Each structure stands twice: as C-alpha cells, then as structure tokens.
Amino acid sequence: QITLKESGPTLVKPTQTLTLTCTFSGFSLSTRGMGVGWIRQPPGKALEWLALFYWDDDKRYSPSLKSRLTLTKDTSKNQVVLTLTNMDPVDTATYYCAHRMTWDYSFDYWGQGTLVIVSS
Amino acid sequence: QSALTQPASVSGSPGQSTTISCTGTSSDVGGYNYVSWYQQYPGKAPKLIIYEVSNRPSGVPDRFSGSKSGNTASLTISGLQAEDEADYYCTSYTGSSTLVVFGGGTKLTVL
C-alpha cells in the first residue's frame, strides 16, 4: 500500500526558506520508473506542478520556480525534501507530494497536503 | 493563467451525462498521450480518475471516460450522481522544461 505524507511548518515569514518533507512508504524511489512529485494549490485556486524527483536522481523543476526550488532525498528514510527559498505571500498554498505512476506523468497516490501560510 | 483551458463550471442533472473539455496546444495535449484527469473534493487531495487520455485506474467507475481530439481532451461523466459534484482538473505532459501543466479546474454541479 502506497502512502505519502507531507510535513513542515504551517507559517513562514516573507523572505524565509520553506522546507517540506514528504515521507512515503509502499515503494522504493530507487526502482526504475518511480518518481515523487510536488504540486501546490493556493487557496481557492488551481493546482500547480512544482517539481519531480526521478528514481535515477534526475530532477525537474517548474521554470517559474527553478531558481528558488531544490529537491533532495534521503533514501534510508524514504523521504523527499522540498526547499523553497525567499518565500512570498503568493507562495501561500497547500503543498502536496504525490507518487508518479510508473513510466507515466500522472500522480496516482497523493499525500493529504500541508497548508503553508506566508505572512509576517 | 493556467496552461490548459477548462470551463470554470459545468452542471448536469442526476442520470445525465456531462463533458468537461481541456484545451491545450500541440506542445502538450495534442503532442502526447499523457493527459490525466483528477477529481478533487473541497479540502481533500486530488484523486486520479483518468490517465493516458482514456485509462481508468482500478476502482474508478466506468461512468468516467476520457478522450482526445487534436489539442483538446475531454472527460465525460455519464449517469451523473450527486457524489460526482467536485472540482475536476486536467493535466498534460509537455516534453519541455515545464514537465506537467494543469488546467484551471472545472467545478461540476449536480443539480
């Protein structure tokens, strides 16, 4: 059974760095074709793809956030960590991590999401 | 502005069918068969209901079907039920640095 869960701060101040952890189970990110993605959703708005971490350590970032966004992984802990620098109120959103359907670009299992509010 | 265009809202009566469109370009929807659809209830995470244009994950009712023609993908829900009232999002692979693009979402109201 595949599960994912996001964890991190609920409130960050403008200019600060956000660090979110996705802890997953039920699959290995080292298995060919696997991937973990990050998607966010501002309150009342649409979903936005942020990044994807592939099984071979390749990473893809949204061009609009590439300069601020970094993904890392801790294989021993089954975690993928998202770091977003220079937070702004427009980054207020629910952040989701999700399992990439093998060899596809769909996300078939999602975490519950974590709301991050950017405010001073 | 989202990369894929969806109607903001659609509605239908129980038992009827409704279709939600998702219009992109030849660089995304029209260029690849990696179109997906998600259903999202308020306050909940999205749920994958269609992948690769027309495939349903296990457990998704066959009332949900997907198709594509040119640069436009469509999600059809037949035999509408009250529980289908939700937001629906389409996505597509792009093959560019913006790997995946989402639509702006469509709110389905079951009258």
Image (spheres, helix red, strand yellow):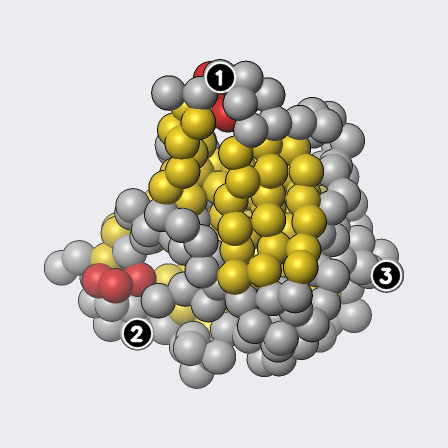
Label 3 resides on the chain identified as A
Q: Secondary structure at mark 3?
A: loop
The residue where tag 3 is placed is A32
Label 1 Cα neighbours within 10 Å, binned few <14 / some 14-19 / many ≥20:
some
Q: Position of residue A65 (x, y in %)?
A: 43, 75
The residue where tag 2 is placed is A86
**Which mark sits nearer the N-terminus, 3 or 2?**
3
Residue type for callout 1: Pro
Residue type for callout 2: Asn
Q: Quadrant of residue A109?
A: top right
**Left or right: residue A108 compared with residue A84:** right
Residue B12 at least partly seen: yes
Quick one: quadrant of the N terminus of chain A?
Answer: top right
> Is the Cβ of the residue at disc 3 closer than 8 Å to that at disc 1?
no
> Is the Cβ of the residue at disc 1 closer than 8 Å to that at disc 2?
no
The residue located at (61%, 27%) in the rendering is: B78
Q: Secondary structure at mark 1?
A: loop
Nearest to the observer: residue A112 or residue B18: B18
Marks 3 and 1 sit apart, C-alpha to C-alpha, by 43 Å
Label 2 resides on the chain identified as A
Marks 3 and 2 sit apart, C-alpha to C-alpha, by 34 Å
Residue type for callout 3: Arg
Q: Secondary structure at mark 2?
A: loop
Query: Is the same chain shared between marks 3 and 2?
Result: yes
